[in-house]
Image: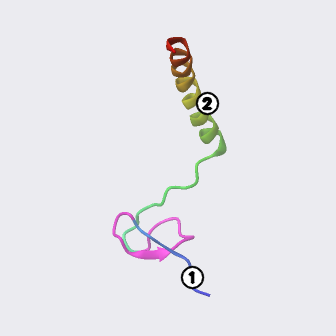
Amino acid sequence: MAEKTRECPSCALEGPSDASECPYCGYEFPGPHPRWQVWTAFAVAALLVWPLLRLIDHLF
């Protein structure tokens, strides 16, 4: 089975997918987003869209 790799966005060379930084240029890959950030982004998006939906409903 082939080892999984990913391309470094900095130097465009292939490296191991489980590395936290590129072995060639030292670029630090971002980690996964914590769950609270994802839920916070969803809540903010919903709060921004809700007034738009109410305005559209009011106009039509």
For the residue marked with disc 2, what is the amino acid? Answer: Ala
Pointer 1 or 2: first along the chain: 1
In this orientation, which residue lies closer to the viewer: 43 or 27? 43
x and y percentages locating residue 41 in the rendered image: 57, 35
Q: Residue at x 46, y 75 (%)?
A: 15
Answer whether residue 21 is magenta in the image. yes
Q: Residue 43 has which mark?
A: 2
x and y percentages locating residue 16 in the rendered image: 52, 75
How far separated are the C-alphas under marks 1 and 2? Answer: 38 Å
Residue 23 in which image quadrant: bottom left
> Magenta residues, as a range?
9-23
Give the total of numbered labels.
2
For the residue marked with disc 1, what is the amino acid? Answer: Glu
Q: Residue 3 has which mark?
A: 1
Kindly report which numbered mark, 1 or 2, lies closer to the viewer in this rendering: 2
In this orientation, which residue lies closer to the viewer: 34 or 56? 56
